[in-house]
Image (tube, helix red, strand yellow):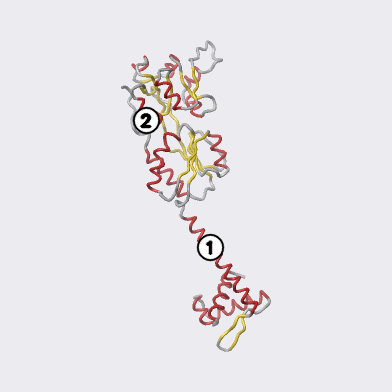
Amino acid sequence: MTLTELRYIVMLAQEKHFGKAAERCYVSQPTLSVAVKKLEDELGMPLFERHKGNISVTDLGQRLVQQAQNILDQVSIFKDMAKEGQQQLNYPFKLGAIYTIGPYLFPHLMPQLNSIAPDMPLYIEENYTAVLKRKLKECELDAIIIALPFEEPDVVTLPIYDEPFVVVLPKGHHLCRHRHIEAHMLSEDNLLMLGPGHCFRDQVLDTNPTLKNLMNPSRPGANKPLMTEGSSLETIRHMVASGFGISVLPMSAMLASPDHAQQIEVRHFKSPAPFRTVALAWRVTFPRPKAIETVKQSIQHCRVLEEPVPADT
């Protein structure tokens, strides 16, 4: 039994004529006749009574033809749903980002994405890398924005941009006289950093061996800098502005906060400067590659990080 055979008996029941039914099915009359007879033989009963010049549908045949029509209707609905699925930019997209990226990227990304994919609402979430990874694997998120390194089975990870780290100083701090900061200089004042568990803290330490060594309490003759831990980059930035200490922040955190220009000065690290690589990650099996490409292009188009931060002010 095939869908084609079901379509033949429905058309034959409507036309009550083999020739006319064959024309509507775009097949020859013998082809349709053979297919209908084959189906009747498979069912073990006639569906039609053949008369000279016309046919009629048996009582049981009426019920089976109606059921065949129901099946064909459901198949049509199924195909329509599949076509809708091909419109990959017509459904919501659930995007997560780590805490140190989301606040600075999402305000630029959302209007940009809305301008090129207005029928794809963006639902956003900020969280820790471990939580975002779990939600991605469990299909609670479609994609996540994280900092490398990030490796997870069955997940595609695509680097999007590199973001340098900068030193943030209170206005008038003695380090402001330097155009570029060396890592060992960070031991000269209260260093404000995120607490353990924040990936940005680890990124700062991992990309700056000198600073990581300074933070090691078991180092012989250790003279670890005074360090204060904050709960967010925004808290740290406000603390620097109030003169409580110095810090290392991603450049985007400073570009997004011009309100502190009168209280804060920014300095680049001496080359080679530390940086992080921001990446987009999604499941290998995610069925909407056009949506992923659109999100990727929107992130790149934002160009949030391209504005230069003056090395001296």
Which of 233 and 35 lies nearest the eye of the viewer?
Answer: 233
Which of the 4 quarters of the picture holds residue 104? top left
Q: Earlier in the sequence, mark 1 or mark 2?
A: 1
Residue that lies at the very extreme toward the right in this rendered image: 44
Query: Which secondary structure, mark 2?
Result: helix
Which of 265 and 241 lies nearest the eye of the viewer?
Answer: 241
Residue that lies at the very extreme toward the top in this rendered image: 221
Q: Residue at the location (53% across, 37% down)?
A: 132
Q: Which mark is residue 210?
A: none
Q: Amino acid at mark 2?
A: Leu
Q: Position of residue 283 (x, y in %)?
A: 53, 44
Residue carrying label 2: 255
Q: Position of residue 167 (x, y in %)?
A: 40, 22
Residue that lies at the very extreme toward the bottom in this rendered image: 52
**Height in image: 239 above or below 100?**
above
How far, Cα to Cα, is label 1 from label 2? Answer: 50 Å
**Height in image: 32 above or below 82?**
below
Q: Which mark is residue 77?
A: 1
Q: Residue at the location (45% across, 44% down)?
A: 122
Query: For the residue carrying disc 1, how many other residues have a C-alpha within 10 Å: few (<14), some (14-19), or many (20+)?
Result: few
Q: Residue at the location (62% across, 70% down)?
A: 1
Residue that lies at the very extreme toward the left in this rendered image: 313
Query: Which secondary structure, mark 1?
Result: helix
Query: For the residue carrying disc 2, how many other residues have a C-alpha within 10 Å: few (<14), some (14-19), or many (20+)?
Result: some
Q: Position of residue 29 (x, y in %)?
A: 53, 81
Q: Amino acid at mark 1?
A: Ile
**Height in image: 305 above or below 53?**
above
Q: Position of residue 53 (x, y in %)?
A: 55, 88
